[in-house]
Every structure is written in structure tokens, then in C-alpha cells.
Amino acid sequence: MRDVFESALEKLFTDHVSAEAVLNAERDGWQPQLWAAIEESGFALASAPEELGGAGASWDDLFGVLQLCGRFSLPLPLPEALLGNWLLGQCGLEAIAAPLSVAPRADLVWEGGRVSGTLQQVPWGRHVEQVVAVVAGPEPTVVVLATAACSDKILSTNTAGEARDDLVFEQATPLASQSLAAGLAADVLWQGGALLRSVQMAGALQEVMRVAAEYVNERVQFGKPIAKFQAVQHQLAVLAEHVAATRVAAEAACVESTAGLALLPLMAAKICASEAAGIGASSGHGVHGAIGFTHEYSLHLLTRRLWSWRSEFGSLTYWSDQLGQAVCGAGVKLYWPTITSGALPQ
Amino acid sequence: MSIDQFNYTRIPADAELLRAEVREFLSQTLADFPAVRRADSWMGFDAEFSCKLGARGWVGMALPKQYGGADASAFARYVVIEELLAAGAPVSAHWFADRQSGPQILHYGTQAQRDFHLPAICRGERYFCIGMSEPGSGSDLASIKSRARREGDKWVLNGQKVWTTNAHRAHYMIALVRTSDSDNRHGGMSQFIIDLTLPGITVRPIKDLTGSEHFNEVFFDNVELSDDDLIGSEGQGWQQVTAELAFERSGPERFLSSMALLNTLIEMIGEQPDRLQAREIGRLTARLFTLRNMSLAVTRQLQEGKNPAWAASCVKDLGSVFEQEIPEIAQLLTETLPTSSGGSDHARVLAYLMQQAPSFSLRGGTREILRGIIARGLGLR
Ligand SMILES: Cc1cc2nc3c(=O)[nH]c(=O)nc-3n(C[C@H](O)[C@H](O)[C@H](O)COP(=O)(O)OP(=O)(O)OC[C@H]3O[C@@H](n4cnc5c(N)ncnc54)[C@H](O)[C@@H]3O)c2cc1C
């Protein structure tokens, strides 16, 4: 399944998601034609079960798709739509084809059949039509809110010009709602978002690696390609190690998340990817010299995303803290068994 | 070389079944084994323990049944060795035979060499050491000078090896030596299986900076060898050694050397870590978990009969950075005076591993050499 998805989407992105298209999106915002192409391909629905309008694709199946979104700097919330539709599917709700995002954090409360509160840092918030969010509480519910119904928007963008907006709702009637499926945490979208960003970063880092290796073989200084200098070689060797770590960690998180989100692999993936993001941006730019620092040269499309994605849905510090609390709290006897079982101690 | 070689690989269920058995065995056999000795990891030598493992079928287990092995998969062997390393079991005696000499004899050895060595290896009774480095040849291994000359139907070996781990306790050395002149830098070398009791061999232990005796210098003074001692083909020594290095660099011993310290550190911190402690332990845990997944991806390639030399170098380099950082992070997280005697378990394990740590990125190929190999794979050399 993974290969089929990947090759189909790679073709679509190669045709539609050029560096120029990404820059246009950063400048102009939403790219309706691009979204239309994705909507037509049906990819945004893939994570929902077939009976609810999707393709029943697991995170394992979608690993390649998410990596491609990172590699191409896709300027649309396809990863977020996949997460939203996955959660709706888990809770028995119909998948949504319209532009869709998720709320990483929300402080929503029910007031009768309506909800009030703020959805924080919604990716592409100002552009999408609907947002999936979770109303916490003793019986958490998943809700779909129409962005048209929000009473206020506090706009912000990340370092890559991607909208990350707070959406305020007052007494809004959800388009759909359902109890959160058993086994899912109230911060499932936060966890799932960390999974998305880890895999996107794995894709972006592989592209940084590829572009850098290509560039150092072309650029000549002191009469030879700079690739022949050991200091350059070793920087990229270390980068390759981190890219490899990020890739396998992200894949582990996806493969192990077929039943529900696998927290330990997911935390490891976000921590390793966030660490690698800094190294990738530093070495990637380092070996490029001044040309890589220009707007003209497209390396920054990747690095400006890495700088933001590593902090979104929980930073290195956030997830390290969570993981450290969990393993220390369980005591040293469970430490090694936790590593080999791949599951956090209960 | 493609990053895609790092495919997430789950240990197959049948191999995973062994884990409980190994853990049970270790918790009984090593019940009173002190933390400081656990810190010796795969440098800890205990022949009796190796024989016990041999009796359980856990040495040379990937070798064929006809030689006393278990025809086990690379994953089954992985489960056993990672459990041994995580527990700090004293595996050094049989380690090199299990990891590389056994597979090498199976691959290149004559029938007589297999019949003679492999069953003893599988019993945990026969120990090997690896004779590559010489005083003038470390990273530049191809510059070795030890030389075996043909005299009639014999070979006469003269020269010196150095840093040979366990030579003072091993029965045999597999040595890379020069056997002819060659215009090709990588030509003219061959490997011999050398019985260390032969006349003309002197083994002198070299104390390491902690005062421990793990490695040695070995002198060869007109040592007589026969064609039967040659392993593989004459002149193919370099190719054989290169293949061997994939086994040498890919295993969990390349990131678990400081496991004893990570354990005492977590114990010392206790169940309510402060913010800094939680973050650093969390970050180390994520890296450990991921290094293991990288190493399993390499194991899959070994199992499929591929040569994962490039990917193994990635694991070893990233792994030794990790092992070396643990003593540094331990210093950052707790107020512990490292002690060589007296003090708590944690203080002694910290002292020991802090001092051993520099060797982690030397043995088995230095950081710079590994990064060079990785760069070559990336098309930069
Ligand atoms: C604990 C321990 C156990 C060992 N056990 C064994 C054993 O059992 N058998 C065995 O044969 N050997 C063994 N060794 C030796 C080990 O393989 C060598 O130490 C290693 O290959 C480096 O060689 P060297 O020490 O001569 O250092 P050198 O090669 O002299 O290196 C010194 C420094 O120069 C750098 N350098 C060298 N060449 C280059 C280059 N081309 N580019 C950039 N930098 C370079 C190195 O990276 C290193 O930083 C052991 C070593 C240790 C520390």
C-alpha cells in the first residue's frame, strides 16, 4: 500500500509543487488549485475507514505520503487533514473532503449543545473550512467546527510563512461531534501532530542531505570540488547519521501506530527529528556558503520549515521531559524492558 | 548509499521468544554481580560464564547445527547479545569468536578449520583475538609490516601486533599479515589463524589508563606456520578483513557500552526527577531507542546476506557519541564525585566509564575513519 500511495503522490507533487509554487503560497496564502488537485486525488481522505469515506490507510501506509509532504514543503494541510480524518474515523464520524485542519491545543467547553473557547495555533487556520478539535473533560468529545463560525481570529505565521492561527469560538454549534473513542487521550491531536511533524522532518532532512551532497560536488574552491575537503565530508557524514536516525525513528512511530498512537516511538521520533533539524539546518547551510543564505536558492524552503516544525506539537524539551518523567517514574528495573518492548511503562 | 537502508525492523516473534529465557538466566547467574563489573560490559572476561552460555547454546548460535550452533537467525542472536550487554554480563572471553572469528571461519575456512574450531567456539571454550593494528599501522591498516615468508612448505612469520584485546587470554589470533610484495596498496596481504602457544610468540599486556589489562602487544619471532593455518585465499586478506568489519561495527555493543552508568544514574535520580534530569534522561532514552532501531535495520541486512558496511558505520559513529556523552550527562545531572574505590556504585561506575569512554571512538575504527567511510558512501570521496 505504502509504495502505491507514495509513487502516486510523488507524481502529483512533482507536477504541482515546485519551489516557485511554495514561494507563491508563502506570499499569497492558500493555493486553491493545488488543494483542488489533492482533493481530487482523494489523498486527504485516505486515513479514514472505507465505510466512512476513506481508504482505510494506516499510518504505516501513509509514512511515505507524509515524508513527501516534508520533502516538497507542501504548502497545504494535507498531513493535518489526514490526522483529522483519522480521528473522525476512529470515533465513527464521516470523513471530510473540504479543506481541513486540526487544533493542536484547545480550551473548549460545552455550553448546552454548543462549544466556546479557543483553538490554539491551528495550522492553516485562516484558510481551512473546518477544524477537528477535542473538548476535554471527564468525557472528552471530538468536534468538527466550521471556521466561518468563529468569532475571532488571532493570526500568526511560523518561520516558513505557514499560518498558525488561534480561532476563538463563542457558543458555536459543531458540525459533528462524538465521544472520543476508547484508548485515545484528550491530547490525541497533539500527539498525532507530533507524529506528522516527525515524518515531515524526516522527509525534509533527506532532501537537505541530497541537495547538500549534490552542491558540494559541484562547487569548486582551491581548484577542487569542496566535497574533497575532509571537514566538509565529515559534516555531511554526521548529518547523514542524524537523517538516518530520524528516518528510522519516524518509520517506527508510523508502523507501531496502526492500532492507536504508539507513544514511546512517537516521542523518540519527535525528539530525534527535532535534534536533527538543528543539525541539518546548520550543516546544510554551512556547506552551501552564502548562496544557501539567499532567497533565490531554495534550501531555505526546507530549513525554515525545520526550524518551526521541530517546535510544533511539542518541542524537543517538551517531549524529552515527558519521556524522562515516564521512564524515571517507572524505576530503573523497568528501564531496559521499556526499550525492548517499545511501550511506555504503565 | 541510501538512507532507505534504515528500514524499521521489528524483531520476529520467534526470536523475541528467547528474551524471557535469557533474562531469567541472567537474573539468576548474575544476581550478585557488582555494578562496577557490569560496567566492564563486553570487556569483562569470565571463562566460566562463557562456558555456561555455551552450554545454553548461546555462543555461536548463528552457526550451523553440524558445528554445534543453532542455525539461529541474526535476530535471535541479537536478542541474546543485547540482553547480555544490557545486563553487563562478562562476555569478553568468547565475544570476538562469537561475533567475527566464528562467522569468518565458517565463510572462508577449510573443512578442517571449521571442524576444529567451530564446535569449541560454540561450547564457549575457545577464544580468539583480532590481530590487525601494529605500532606503525592504526587507521592506515593497509600499511602493516608483519610478514610471513614462504620457506619450503612453511610460512615464517616475523613482526608485531599491538592493542590486541584479550591476546593474553585468547587461544588463537586471526592476524592480517603481508605475504607478498604488491603494487596494489590493498594487495599482498593474507590472514592466518595463529595458535598463540607456538614458539616464537611473546604476548605482553599493556595497562590502559585505568590500570586494567585488556589489550596487549604481541611479538612474532620466526613463528613457523603452515598452509593449514592460512584462512581464506592467499593475497585476499584485505577483502576478508573489510567484510569482517561489517560484523565488527554493526552490533549493539556499539551503543550499549555505558548502559551500566545509565542504569545507576536513573537509580540515583529516583522516581521524581527534576526538570533538567527528566529532560536529559528523556533525550538519552529517545536516542537509545532509535540507535537500537538503526542497529536492527543493519541486522536485517546481515540476515538478508547483504553487506551493510556503510550503515554499520553510521550506527557505530552515532552510537559511540551516545556512549561517550552518558558520563558527561551523568556529571551534569547529579552531584557525584567519581571514585576509584569507596563511594557508591554510581560513583564508581561513573569513574570507570568516564575513563573508558575515550576508547569507544577508537576501537573498531576511529570517528574520523568512520566518517570517511560514510562520506565515501555519500559520493563525496
Ligand atoms: C580499547 C581498545 C581496544 C582495541 N582492540 C584492538 C584489537 O583487539 N585488535 C586490533 O587490531 N586493534 C585494536 N585496537 C586498535 C584500534 O583499532 C586503533 O586504535 C585504531 O584503529 C586507531 O589507530 P591508532 O590508535 O594507531 O590511531 P591513529 O591511526 O594514529 O589515529 C590517531 C588520530 O588520527 C586520526 N586520523 C588517522 N588517519 C586519519 C585520516 N586519514 N583522516 C583523519 N584523521 C585521521 C584518527 O582518527 C585519530 O583521531 C584497540 C584500540 C583500543 C583503544
Image: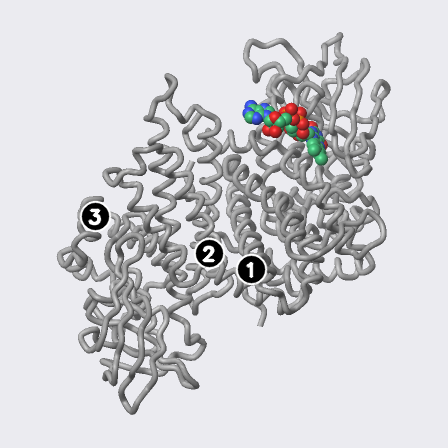
Residue placed most toward the observer, B79 or B283:
B283
Q: Is residue B68 visible?
A: no
- In the image, which disc is placed on residue B279? 1
Q: Is residue A47 above or below residue B331?
A: below
Q: Chain under label 1? A: B
Between the C-alphas of marks 2 and 3, the distance is 28 Å
- Residue B91 location (% of width, % of height): 75, 46
Q: Is residue A236 above or below residue A189?
A: above
Tell me the crowding category of disc 1: few under 14, some 14 to 19, or many 20 or more residues within 10 angstroms, Cα based: many
- Residue A89 location (% of width, % of height): 32, 73
Residue placed most toward the observer, B75 or B375:
B375
Query: Which colour style is shown?
Result: one colour
Q: Is residue B162 visible?
A: yes
> Which is closer to the viewer, label 2 or label 3?
3
Between the C-alphas of marks 2 and 1, the distance is 15 Å
Q: Amino acid at mark 3?
A: Leu
Secondary-structure class at tag 1? helix
Tell me the residue that label 2 is attached to: A269
Pick the quarter of the image with the C terminus of chain B.
top left
> Which is closer to the viewer, label 2 or label 1?
1
Q: Cβ–Cβ below 8 Å for labels 1 and 3?
A: no
- Residue B153 location (% of width, % of height): 75, 11
Q: Chain under label 3? A: A
Secondary-structure class at tag 2? helix
Asked if labels 2 and 1 share a chain, the reply is no
Q: Chain under label 2? A: A
Q: Is residue A179 above or below residue A46?
A: below
Q: Amino acid at mark 1?
A: Arg
- In the image, which disc is placed on residue A23? 3
Q: Is residue B351 left or right of residue B373?
A: right
- Residue B353 location (% of width, % of height): 72, 46
Secondary-structure class at tag 3? helix
